[in-house]
Amino acid sequence: MPPSNLPSWLRTLIYDVAAKEWPGYYGLYLEAQVLVESGGQVDARSEAGAMGLMQLMPATAAGLGFSAEDLLLPRKNLTAGLRHLKEQWDKFPEVSRSDRLSFSLAAYNCGRGWVNQALKLARADCGAASSRDAGNWQRWDVAGPYLEHPDCRKAGGRNPDGRQAMLYVARFWAVFDRLNRGSK
C-alpha cells in the first residue's frame, strides 16, 4: 500500500473491504474516495446529512440494507459505500472502462438521473442515434461537462450542482494520482 495520512488500521480495512466486496477493484481507488469524502473521519457528518467515511445519506444506506447507525461503523460504511458505487458502475455498460469510474463517481456524488441527462445531451450533440453508438459522447471529458448544462435536470426540474460534481471527480483523480505516485 502507498503512503497515506490514514491510520494503518483504517487503510487495512479499506483494502480488505475492497477485496471482499468488489474483487478486482483497486483498493487505492477506495482509499482515494474515503479521503475525498470524509478525510478519513469515521464520524464525519455533512450539512446535508451524509454520514461516515463514504458520506452516505441514510436513505441511500437503507436502500442498500444498512441503517443510519451502520453508517458510523467503518466496515459497514465502507461496504455500503462501495456497494453503492458498484451499483453506479454496473449501470454504465455503454461507457468504456477507462471512463466508467468517473461517471460512476459523478452518479455517486450527484445522482444517477443527472448523469443520465448529461450523457443524453452529449449523445445528442455528438450525433449518436442511440446509446449503443460508440463515440466521443461516452467519454468523461466530453459528457462530464454537460452536468453544468442548463438542460441537465433531475426529475422535479431542479438543476444539480454540476460544477460540484465535476470538482468531486477531479478531486478524486488528484488524490488517487498523489497516492499512486507514492506507491512507486
Image (tube, rainbow, N blue to C red):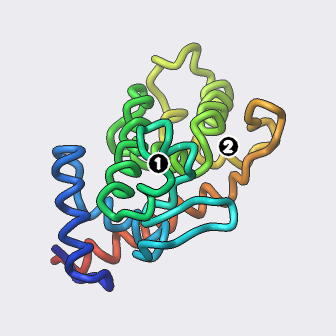
Q: Residue shown at 23%/54% (left/top)? A: 18
**Percent from the top left, x then y, of residue 38?**
48, 71
Q: Residue furthest top?
A: 129
For disc 2, the neighbor class at 10 Å (few under 14, some 14 to 19, many from 20) is many
Disc 1 crowd rating (10 Å Cα; few below 14, some 14-19, many 20+) is some
User: In the rendered image, which residue does mark 2 sit on?
Assistant: 146
Quarter of the image for the C terminus: give it: bottom left
Query: Image point 31% across, 60% down: which residue?
Result: 29
Instruction: Write the residue at 81% across / 32% down.
Output: 156
Give percent across and percent down for residue 49.
Answer: 64, 60
Residue 142 position within the rendered picture, expressed as x and y whole percent measured from the top left: 57, 43
The structure residue drawn at horizontal position 49% and vertical position 34%, both measured from the top left corner, is 138
Q: Which mark is residue 164?
A: none
Residue that carries the numbered disc 1 in the rendered image: 67
Residue 63 drawn at (x, y percent): 49, 36
- Left or right of 111 on screen, residue 171: left
Mark 2: secondary structure? helix
Residue 184's place in the image compared with 28, above or below, is below
Q: Nearer the viewer, residue 91 or 96?
A: 91
The picture quadrant where one finds residue 35 is bottom left
**Residue nearer the viewer, 156 or 69:** 69
Q: Earlier in the sequence, mark 2 or mark 1?
A: 1
Q: How many marks?
A: 2
User: What quarter of the picture does the N terminus occupy?
Assistant: bottom left
Q: Depth check: 73 or 23 in front? A: 73
User: Residue 27 or 93: which is nearer the viewer?
Assistant: 27
How far is mark 2 from mark 1, CA to CA? Answer: 34 Å
Instruction: Label 1, secondary structure: give it.
Output: loop
Do the numbered discs 2 and 1 sit on residues whose CB atoms are within 8 Å? no
